[in-house]
Image (cartoon, grey):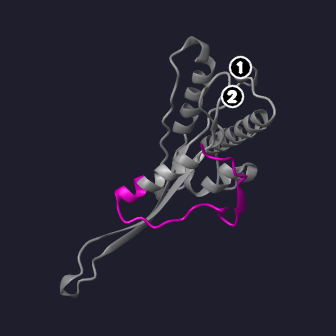
């Protein structure tokens, strides 16, 4: 089981995050496994393995294509960043039975999810570049600010429970994903790779 670590930010990065170089898919998978092992989960009344934090896994990469033979400098290089985020689900405090530390964690999770939903809503409704997007309202949205708009692409995968007892939570998750899917990228920033 992972342990809960209070996230601190410095400049654009989380303090104490793990940075490693990977040369191939196997090494990336190993690093992702390490991140999953560090994740903190605890039992609540509604979930035997409730995530007590979000998992943010970031890959910075450089890709080159083309050739450099015959003094032909036609090598094209691109850099990118891929965030893989597993969001802890929001909790209905009355259903989860959270109290003490679990209650504090649930409040933090719900607050960051609300901040993310607000950023997505503001991006969706953005009329001009001068409209304020509240990225600084949470550490999650602040870390993701460069990936939530511009020439970024976003994909949301929502896991829902088929049980009637979890209907409201599943419906909220679907509504969240529907909002996220309506955020449009700036046409001039789209890049074909």
Q: Does residue 149 appear in the picture of this structure? A: no
Q: Position of residue 118 (x, y in %)?
A: 69, 40
User: Residue 112 lies in what quarter of the image?
Assistant: top right
Residue in the picture at 43% in, 54% down:
30
Q: Is residue 115 above or below residue 26?
A: above
Q: Are marks 1 and 2 in contact (CB under 8 Å)?
A: yes
| Residue 74 horizontal side relative to residue 97, left or right | left
Q: Does residue 13 appear in the picture of this structure? A: yes
Q: Among all residues in the image, which is located at the extreme front? A: 1
In front of the other: 6 or 1: 1
The stretch in magenta equals 1-29
Q: Secondary structure at mark 2?
A: loop
Label 2 Cα neighbours within 10 Å, binned few <14 / some 14-19 / many ≥20: many
Residue, disc 2: 91
Q: Main secondary structure of the magenta part?
A: loop
Residue, disc 1: 95
| Res. 111 mark | none
User: Residue 46 lies in what quarter of the image?
Assistant: top right
In front of the other: 127 or 122: 122
In front of the other: 169 or 117: 169
For the residues labelled 1 and 2, the Cα–Cα distance comes to: 8 Å
Total marks placed: 2
């Amino acid at each position: 089981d992972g342990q809960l670590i209070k996230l601190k930010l410095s400049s654009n990065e989380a303090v104490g995050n793990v940075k490693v170089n990977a040369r191939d898919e196997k090494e990336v998978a190993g690093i992702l496994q390490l991140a999953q092992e560090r994740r903190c989960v605890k039992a609540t009344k509604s979930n035997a393995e409730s995530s007590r934090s979000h998992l943010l896994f970031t890959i910075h990469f450089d890709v080159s294509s083309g050739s450099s033979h015959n003094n032909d400098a036609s090598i094209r290089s691109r850099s990118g960043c891929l965030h893989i985020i597993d969001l802890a689900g929001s909790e209905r405090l009355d259903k989860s039975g959270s109290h003490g530390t679990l209650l504090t964690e649930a409040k933090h999770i719900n607050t960051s999810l609300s901040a993310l939903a607000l950023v997505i809503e503001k991006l969706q409704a953005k009329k001009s570049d001068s409209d304020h997007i509240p990225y600084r309202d949470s550490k999650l949205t602040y870390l993701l600010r460069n990936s939530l708009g511009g020439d970024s692409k976003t994909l949301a995968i929502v896991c829902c429970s088929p049980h009637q007892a979890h209907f409201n939570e599943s419906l909220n998750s679907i509504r969240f994903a529907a909002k996220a899917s309506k955020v449009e990228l700036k046409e001039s920033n789209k890049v074909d790779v």
